[in-house]
Image (spheres, rainbow, N blue to C red):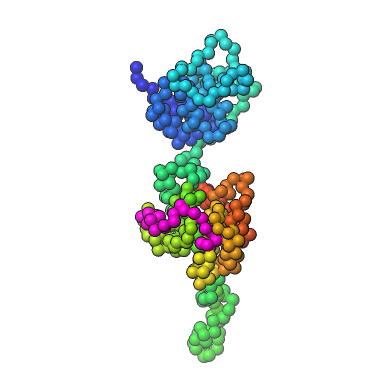
Amino acid sequence: MPSPDLAAISARFAAHLHAVGVEVGPDRAGRFASTVQLARPGTTDELYWLGRVTLTGSPTDIAIYDRVFADVFLGIADVSDSRGDPNQPSVDSFDRRSPRPVPDAAAPPRSSGAPRTSPEQRDSGEMADDENVTERPTGAPASSQELLRRRNFAACTQHELAQLRRLVSELEVAAPQRSSRRRRRHRSGTSVDHRATLRRARRTGGHPAHLIRRRTTARRRSVVLIADVSGSMETYSRAYLYLLHGAVEALRAETFVFATRLTRLTRTLRTSDPEHALRTAVDGVDDWSGGTRIGEAIREFNDRWGRRGLARGAVIVIVSDGWESDDPALLGEQMARLSRLAHRIIWVNPRAQSDRYQPLAAGMAAALPHVDTFTSGHSLDALDEVLAAIARD
């Protein structure tokens, strides 16, 4: 007997789930096929749970998954039959040694869902007369790149982080402009260039018949990125090192990392090979994944680099969750110093992705009054907000 086409079965099952509203893309369908191939389920109970853990993304998808599973595998009893019946025991896990029970053909249909119909019957329109059935619009499943853009950096695998490096390198990092002290000749300028006008007057016998004007030019503001690489930010550190490398390459930005002390990485990241730069950066930071002393790191930056000109009129981007092991009063004092030097301070906290987030950490509460823009930056889509805040005039 020839073996079933696993790819076709997985694709058809995923297509049915997507048609009724479950967000199932090609990545989940492929993960389901790989899991079935590795686990080789011997019962439908095992197949049910393999599909449930790989094809559903939220608790609201479970009821829809149960109904579609029963439709695709017609005539097989579902483990969710006991859900909602107080007389039935709850299903905590499946037993590999016991076969899945087959329902009696004379048994009445379940009252918790629609009557069982095959996919062919649903496709041929025989359910069109049922007033309780509503069709949902179907769209194309999200691509792997679109899913990766919404994926939290902390949930990315090593393979996804490798793809993330390419996507981050394609981001357009721009810096805001500021007025320069230099002026350039321009016919619609607001001031007269007296020296150039007098030199031109020699051609007209000393009469300034033509006024040469000039206007103020614009130059790019400095951008400084300071990233927290302590233990509480370890899951986000690699993704933000990609951003630091891209900022150094695109803007010649200054980059620093800190845990218990501050380390400058600008020269280390100034190379065309990002992986080599990141390996060198990790090896050069002795306190990687250590404790967190945000106030001391900001104080060292202000004393050694900030007040000497690096922070004056610059856009400062700080990436940290705000967990401070030192006195939070020191962090508040140093953030006040930094705000008087910088043009704008952007604080990126991946923990702020939740709608219920509140800055209850003492360090975050002390720093927040001196922050101009507060954002999460936990994914590529959220990273667009960070880049927009950097480029904003």
Count how many numbered circles sit on residues in the image.
Answer: 0
Of residue 343 and residue 340, the one placed in the foreground of this image is 340
Residue 304 falls inside the magenta stretch: no
Residue 128 in view: no
Q: Which residues are magenta?
A: 276-298
| Up-down relation of residue 183 to residue 374 (above or below) | below
Asked whether 283 falls inside the magenta stretch, the response is: yes
- Which residue appears farthest toward the bottom when viewing the image? 205
Furthest residue in direction right, as rendered: 131
Q: Is residue 248 visible?
A: yes
- Name which residue lies at 55% across and 88% down: 207
Quadrant of the drawing holding the N terminus: top left
The image shows residue 355 at horizontal and vertical percentages of: 62, 45
Along the viewing direction, whichever of 99 and 15 lies nearer the viewer: 99
Q: Residue at x 57, y 61 (%)?
A: 331
The residue lying at 46 percent from left, 17 percent from top is 99
Residue 145, image x and y in percent?
Answer: 46, 43
